[in-house]
Amino acid sequence: MGLGPLEAQQTRMRILLTRPTNVFVMLLLDACIWLQRTDVVDLRNRVQDIPSQFIYDVYDFVVIGGGSAGCAMAARLSEVCDWNVLLLEAGGDESFISDLPYLYPVLQKSKMDWQFETEPNERFCRGMRDNRCSWPRGKVLGGSSVLNAMMYVRGNREDYDEWASLGNVGWSWRDVLPYFVKMENVRDERIARQPWHGRTGPMTVELVRNRSELQPYFLRAAQQLGERMADEVNGPDQLVFAPLHGSLRDGLRCSTAKAYLRPVAQRKNLHISMNTVVEKILIDPRDKRAYGVQFRKGNRLQYVMATKEIILSAGALNSPHLLMLSGVGPRDQLQAHGIPVLQELPGVGRNLQDHVAAGGGVFLIQNPDRDGRPLSIRMTQVVQIDTARDFLYHNNGRLVSMPSCEVMGFINTKYNQPGSRRPDVQIFMSAQSDISDGGVESAQGAGLTYDYYSRNFESWVYKDSFLVMPLLMRPKSRGWLELPSANPRDKIKIHPNYFAFERDLDILVEGLKFAVQVAETPEMRRLNATFIYDKAHDDTCRGEKGDNFFKCLITHYSQTIYHPCGTAKMGPSSDPMAVVDDQLRVHGIGGLRVVDASIMPTITTGNTNAPVIMIAERAADLLKYAHLPALLTETHYSQCESINFLYHPGEVKTVPGSGMQRRMKV
């Protein structure tokens, strides 16, 4: 029999009373970092915000969005000393707390998060408040590379070969691999020597520094299920299980702001304007060329012109939103809100894809050793003086552990093509679960109702447990974005359309069955692993049998893994739903390119942050190749650094900067 409203209110009060304590601890930790950790504070290299009165009227390039792609774009374009580059970012600088891997969940629902939510739907997120999924997106310099779980996954080679097969020349695996190598600085010696990795790029890649005692259990359990072990998931074969590699530097988060912008923050030809909301891209209706940007910094409305190109890198939600506000998109949506149609592109905001996950795969455990100490990572052992001391003085301890995943793997379900090397399910194995933090993340961050949390998790808060989470890799279902109004302050409406095709749900059911099989291995039986839903008080799904039981669980606890993409997809002009071509130029509009996850025709196999940075690296080369030929003939060069870019895969050209540098305001 399920619990009643009283128990739900008790859960709500417990969580709400816990939050002030956590906030106080965060503030105290923030102050201690300021005093003790100069490497985290990094005052010398922090990006300086340009005051609005010093923003030029004209730049060569304007980059809209200082996220994962935008930071890389601005850094690479400003390598050319003769080019003035302006980067516009809606949020501020990343905080000290955001450097700590363990604390990434507390960044959600903060001022660094756009705090998007999906439109209500009875087919998914049924256990969430108002049937809305929470979709965190970075509103901060570095974008979602500041909010995400830092997992470094390139994807599958077949992902990119598929892009090329759709008519996108230059985007096959052979074409994009050099850009992954270029961006990487792999610090794990076991894999750094492999020819498919780089060691000199800006993005540092490391193993998670602090790992729980459960990690070897995870690896042995997967092996007992017949899965192959490897040193990494980014090698030649993706159907493996391996310890997690992350976008980390010395155990701390390595965002694109830290990797790309801080080393070049003193460049005179790069201006960065934070807390700046772009309202519209200015397009000349006569020749359909983008020539400027309308934005607001504080209460001041401003305009800036771009003599060469505008790069739209606002992300898979905000990039199509800005295109529509600027008159580029589906005719019916634009006309409904009185926006003049400058270029009809019905694909803007369509083709929305995401890696939906089955949340709640929690398993209770007991340490078989005599001392019975907990094996998992729980909030009660993290919020301690010793933990803070470990971090502040030794750069170690639980604050540099990864709460969402310690072991990652990929599997094929029975629905995948026989013999496929392109998995259809990704698996996270974590030493922290929905009960480890008392629901502060799951009930608050993910948006679970207090009633759902109370009935399924409340009785076991802070108990020893682990989490196995399956993710759907290649959804057949496609969602869409809906323009709410002509007001740029109104958030875009999100319709993820999860499980529109029943097969998507069937595949995720197989992933959740795999999670249960993990608990049934000899390795996990040693820990007396028990599926929490077998003990829960919730009657909602208990009457269902077989696969319907798992479907019920999944449709109630549906969870985004923060990988929206495809909403301004890349494709040839013969594709009526394509928004950009294979040079990332917007079809029918001159001087405007889109560079972020929205251009992906199909979602990649695994976490999307590394592919987005790769896209930016390649886009920067496309722009250099388009605009540098005149500079190649210069006989006098400035003292600017060399510009490294790839004309063709594997062929590296070094071109000195031009001596034609114009006078700059400082």
Image (cartoon, helix red, strand yellow):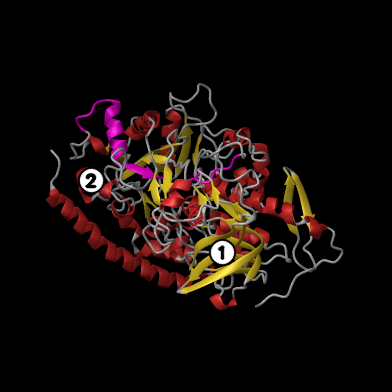
The residue drawn where x is 74% and y is 43% is 650
Figure quadrant of residue 517: top left
Mark 2 is surrounded, within 10 Å at the Cα level, by few (under 14), some (14 to 19) or many (20 or more) other residues, namely many
- Is 95 part of what is drawn in magenta? no
Along the polypeptide, which appears first: circle 2 or circle 1? 1
Three-letter amino acid code of the residue under disc 2: Tyr
Residue 545: within the magenta? yes
Instruction: Name above or below for residue 594 compared with residue 642.
Output: above
Cα–Cα span, label 2 and label 1: 45 Å
Is residue 402 in sight in this rendering?
A: no
Task: Return the mark for residue 452.
Answer: 2
The location of residue 607, given as percent across then percent down, is 49, 44
Up-down relation of residue 534 to residue 334 (above or below): above
- In the rendered view, does 218 fall on the left or right side of 81? left
Picture coordinates of residue 577, whole percent (x, y): 53, 40
Asked whether 157 or 277 is in front, the reply is 277
- Indicate the position of residue 108 as horizontal and vertical percent values: 38, 57
The x and y percentages for residue 158 are 58, 33
User: How busy is the neighbourhood of tag 1: few (under 14 within 10 Å), some, or many (20 plus)?
Assistant: many
Quadrant where the C terminus is found in the figure: bottom right
Does the image show residue 86? yes
Q: Toward the viewer: 40 or 151?
A: 151
Residue occupying the point 72% across, 75% down: 663
From the image, tell me which residue sits under label 1: 293
Which stretch did the figure color magenta? 542-571
Which residue is found at the position 30% from the left and 57% from the top? Answer: 380
**As shown in the figure, which amino acid type bears the numbered disc 1?**
Val
561 to 662, vertically: above or below: above
